[in-house]
Image (spheres, rainbow, N blue to C red):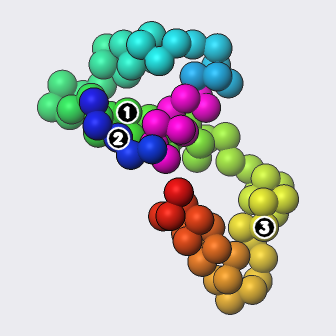
Amino acid sequence: MRMCRQEWGAFEEVCERENISRNDLLGMIEECKNHRLGLTYSARLFIISYFRNAATENGHIAAGHSRNDYGSTLRQLIGHSLTD
């Protein structure tokens, strides 16, 4: 399975938070995914869904995502995520 370092990092974080092995989580995703979708694509969808479901308005404010700074906070986050 090919994912970028950021995706694997997020996947590993889910595994740590949920106390599950990488193989067990991949097995669950494989078992539950739409048969027309590949495992990599399904894992990416899962990662996005996991963190979107965990996101709260207070969490966004604490992370600085909701500041009215004309997008500079978002630009920093984008720049950081694309260069790691």
Q: Nearer the viewer, mark 2 or mark 3?
A: 2
Position of 77 with respect to 33 (left or right) is: right
Main SS of residues in magenta: helix
Marks 2 and 1 in Cβ contact (< 8 Å): yes
Please state which amino acid type lies under the numbered disc 1.
Ala
Gap between marks 2 and 1 measured at Cα: 9 Å
User: Which residue is found at the position 68% from the left and 48% from the top?
Assistant: 55
Q: Is residue 28 visible?
A: no
Residue 64 got which mark?
A: 3
Q: Report x, y in % for residue 47.
A: 48, 38
Location of residue 31 (image quadrant): top left
User: Which residue is found at the position 38% from the left and 46% from the top?
Assistant: 4
Depth order, front residue of 37/15: 15
Say which label, 1 or 3, has the lower sequence index: 1
Q: Report x, y in % for residue 18.
A: 64, 19
Which element type, helix, strand or loop, lies under badge 3? loop
Region rendered in magenta: 6-14
Residue 3 got which mark?
A: 2
Q: Circle 1 sits on which residue?
A: 43
Instruction: Mark 1: give few (<14), some (14-19) or many (20+) Cα within 10 Å.
Output: many
Say which label, 2 or 1, has the lower sequence index: 2
Depth order, front residue of 60/75: 75
Residue 12 belongs to the span the image colors magenta: yes
Q: Quadrant of the N terminus?
A: top left
Say which label, 2 or 3, has the lower sequence index: 2
